[in-house]
Structure formats: C-alpha cells, structure tokens
Image (cartoon, rainbow, N blue to C red):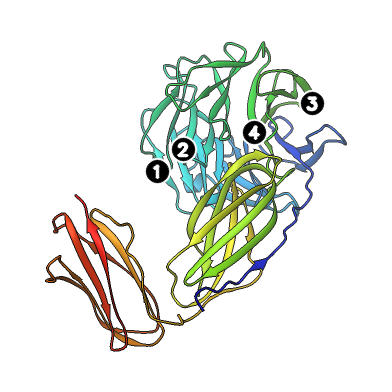
Amino acid sequence: MKKYFIIFLILVFSESYSQKIYWTDGSSGKLQEHAIDGSGTTSDILTGIASTYALGINLNANELYWTDFSASTINKINIGTLTVTPILSSTDGLAGPRGIALDVGNNRMYWADNTSKKIQRSALNGGTITTIISTGLVSPGYVTFDSASGKVYFADNGVGMKKIMRCNFDGTGLQDVATGLSQVWGIAFDAVDNNIYWIDSGIDKIQKGNVSSLPVSKNDVVTGVTGNPRGLVIDAARNFVYWTDNLTQDIKRATTAGASITQLFTGIPYPQGVAINWNSAMPVELSSFTSSVNRNSVKLSWSTVMEDNNRGFSIERKSSGEFKEIAFVNGNGNTNIPISYSYDDRSLQVGTFSYRLKQIDFNGNYKYYELGNEVSIGIPQKFSLSQNYPNPFNPVTNIEFQLPVNSFVELKVFDIVGREVSAIVNQNLSAGYYKYSFDASGFSTGTYFYRVKTDKFSDMKKMIVVK
C-alpha cells in the first residue's frame, strides 16, 4: 500500500459574549463597567480603592489589572467572582506605578514607575521582577504593548522629554517613536494597522503615527479635545478609539478616522484608565479542523467562518508529555469571509500524535481548538530511499529513507568515480522513517551519489552540489 490516509473532523462554534468597557475612577475609588453600546446601566466591579491610575485586561483569565499610584500597588480582580488578588506593592520595590500593559501570551506585564523613573516587568502573578529601562527617563507614564512585534511602548511626560519611546521586551533596542509632543497622556497600539495612538492634551488632540518608520509622522485623529483626557484604548476590529476625560467627567468615542465623536458615559468624577474586551464580541470561529496522513507526514487543514483581530495560529503537537509549538501560521486579522489554512508536519517518526491550534489575537489573548482524535504514523510497508532535497544544493541537503523491519544500515556518499567520501550512518536502526542531513561545505561542485544498504535492501541516487 503506497499511501494511506486518516481524516478527522471537529466542528467548533464560537461562544457569544457581551462586549463591555471598563474604567477606573480615581476620585470615587472604583472600578466600573458598562455595555460598550451604551445599553443598560453602569456597574461597580470594585469600590474602596485608594487611587487608581491605569487599567489592563486579561481576557483568558477574565481579570482586570490596575495600578494604584498613591498606594504603590498593582492588583487584579476576577470579573466573574470579584476576587481581588494583590500582585505587587512597595515591599516589592514599587514606588509610583502608573501605566500598565499585559503581554498575556508570554505571561508578562509591564508598567512605568513614575517615582523611580523605570520601566519594569514581571510575570502576571508578580514573579521575577525585572527592570528593563533604568536610566534616562524623567516622568514615565502610560504603557502599551504590541504582541505582534514584541515591542513595549511608553510615554515620558517629563520636562525635556515629552515623547513616546519603545523597546524590546528585555529593554534592548530603545527608540524614539513620537517626539516633539506637548503633554502626553494615554497611549494605545493598534497592531492591525501598525499605528501608535496617543493623547496630546497640550494641543487638544488625539494623534497617531505608523511605526514602520521612526520617528512617526504625526496625524490628527481627533482635534478640539479641550478637557483633561487621560486613558485611551483602541477597538481595532471596529475602528473605534475610546478615551476618558477628567474635566468633562465622561468617556467618549470616535472612529479611528476621527469621525462620529460620541459622549458615551457621563457623571464619572475622575475617569483615568480604560479597557475593553475588544476581541470577544466576534471571536474567530472555526468551521472545520481535519488531518490526513501520507507515509510519515501529517497535513493539518482548518477553516474559519470569520475572524476578528486574528494574529494567527500556533500549531502544537504532543506525542508524550506536554504540547509543544511546532509552527505558527499567520491569520487574516479581520474578515467576514471564510478562510482556509493548512500546515504540513513532515518527517515524523512512528508513533501516535495529538494536535491543537492556539488561536492568538493581536492583544495576546488566545483560545485552543483541539483535533478530535489522535493521529497515528505506522511502520512503513517496504524499504524505500527518497530523492534528496533540495537538489541541486549548497551546502546542506536532506536524505530520507524508510525501513519496514529493524536493520543494520549503511548510508554513504560517493564521488563521480565511485570513491567513498562520507559515511553518514553505520548502525542498527529500528523499523521506521529516517531523515539525515548531508553537509557538502568541504566538497567541490559536482555530481555525487548516496547509497542506503541493508542486508535485504540497497538503493542509490544521484545528487548535485552547486557552489
């Protein structure tokens, strides 16, 4: 039997969520929520907080994180159970935390400590505190994170600074992003269109700039913001920007093009941080997830009905122990049309495997989709030697063969006149599939031959080195 196939199908239907907006009220000491469309009433999630500043959301755990500048703490609350968990405090070295950003996919959070003038990070549970920027800052404030590129963005509103900067997750690669600003407050990153958004209350504007070229060219989004705007968040999937305003005591919304400015909620004494569960109203919906087996390769195929804020799919495989990532396939961001994807997992050994997809959005949130059944790679039915690939090559190529029974195997390379130039394998091997690399760095351009030999099988093929 030359080929055999196994096909599994699993249908996954998305859950229905109510999209909400959350904010901190620094005057009344509250965390509050409201349906993002304005329906219903405002609800208190938590009261009795000292002085909230910035807000972040972890949708995977249904949790809100916030910084308390005056109490020098970072805390979180489970939105469902209303359980509050202290994360970090002054005993951990916090002096005046302001902005906060979550990298959920990598179990990290970042914050700006305005008092110690640092940008720091830790695990989401507060473990392993690391200072990533420790010098050169004057008054660091709001922070945002781009999970697609792994960049941390932060504003410095100090005298002589007035700009937005970015760095890698470990603090390396520090760059100026937006300079010559007047009074920088909330910042937010839109990974869909690669723009950084910020409030410059000194010139009464919300602006943006594309980070593909730094420093960015500044473009006006909303002008005439004459109050005291603070927190800022982007709904990239629906092209909205939301911001809080202390002076007018409200939360406003506009399109990312600056149109349709709307006052959503009023009567909030001192709104500051703001967050939305922006990826949950229309999550990625899979219609199928299948697998097929050809010899020792597995082809995974899946289709989406629609996608919202979809960065892509981490493909994970398990043969024993834990699932491990083997590849990443980019998503299509936002689309309402069906999209088909596939990935070939090649050169597997004999065994049984489980697969799952980890769908990740541009904010680092994720959801798993598991293949319904295990995939089996059986023992080959016959001896076989495959053509090397690539061919011609320079300097490395791959040689594959298969054994239906345990065998003593010789895999050797010969030059054009038949002289042995390399012995790659000379040992007992179990029945199964094998792949070996041949490095021709020390060989000249020309034709060579490789041969697999056992006591029951022998085959030779030609390969070409081109330099």
Q: Which residue is mark 1?
A: 170
Task: Identify the residue at horizontal 39%, vertical 87% (top origin).
Answer: 405
Q: Mark 3 and mark 1 in contact (Cβ < 8 Å)?
A: no
Q: Tag 4 or tag 1, which sits nearer the N-term?
A: 1
Figure quadrant of residue 396? bottom left
- Spatial CA span between label 1 and label 2: 9 Å
Q: Which residue is mark 3?
A: 264
Q: Is residue 467 above or below residue 32?
A: below
Q: Mark 2 and mark 3 in contact (Cβ < 8 Å)?
A: no
Question: Mark 1 or 4, which is nearer the eye?
Answer: 4
Q: Which residue is mark 4?
A: 236
Identify which amino acid the numbered label 3 is placed on.
Leu
| Residue 192, horizontal then vertical, whole percent | 58, 34
Q: Which mark is residue 151?
A: 2
Element type where label 3 sits in the image: strand
Element type where label 2 sits in the image: strand
Identify which amino acid the numbered label 2 is placed on.
Lys
